[in-house]
Image (cartoon, rainbow, N blue to C red):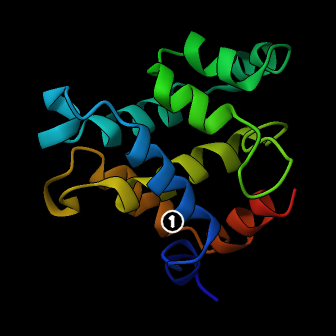
Amino acid sequence: MDAVTYVFDEDGFYVRLANRLLDQAPWYRPAFRHGHGLCLKLDGLAKGLDPATYAQLLQQPVSAGLLALGLPKFMATTLGAASAFGTKKLLAALPVGHLTKALRALIPLACPNLEVCPARADVLKTYASPALAVELKALTQR
């Protein structure tokens, strides 16, 4: 199964996670309601994670680390919470490469229009990775 099929599976992990993010998004904020605010936040987090930052963040709860990186509270809470799909933490103990790819894999699921999305180039580079499906599956099996 390729990454696009895996990520866009309507009963799959990534669709459910994206739906949780969208359900929690502050739609009263114009950037989230009409634009690419969520896309930009996910892409910015993916860009902002470097090994040194990530290593320091592992010493605190996932949601606290995501807040420290500047994510809005609804995103930090959703991504850092114990999963509704199991007892594992969604992002805990992931290698940085897997984490950045997982965040970028969510963008097309939440994006109002990927054709004009400011994160489009980064998303396309991520989806071009031949090992993406394997890495994304690994996240859901932790």
Residue in the image at 33% along x and 39% along y: 38
Q: Secondary structure at mark 1?
A: helix
Picture coordinates of residue 65 (x, y %)? 67, 17
Q: Is residue 100 above or below residue 27?
A: below
Picture coordinates of residue 128 (x, y %)? 48, 70
Q: Is residue 67 above or below residue 119?
A: above
Residue in the image at 19% along x and 28% along y: 28
Q: Amino acid at mark 1?
A: Val
Picture coordinates of residue 63 (x, y %)? 66, 23
Quarter of the view holding residue 130: bottom right
Front residue of 140 and 20: 20
Q: Which residue is mark 1?
A: 15
Name the image quarter holding the N terminus. Answer: bottom right
Drawn side of residue 31 relative to residue 84, left or right: left
Q: Specify few, some or many for label 1: CA neighbours under 10 Å numbering under 14, 14-19, or 20 or more.
A: many
Drawn side of residue 70 relative to residue 108, left or right: right
Drawn side of residue 132 relative to residue 41, left or right: right
Picture coordinates of residue 92 (x, y %)? 80, 36
Residue in the image at 59% along x and 28% along y: 77
Residue in the image at 76% along x and 57% along y: 139
Drawn side of residue 26 relative to residue 75, left or right: left
- Say how many tags the image has: 1
Name the image quarter holding the C terminus. Answer: bottom right
Quarter of the view holding residue 137: bottom right
Q: Is residue 59 above or below residue 21?
A: above
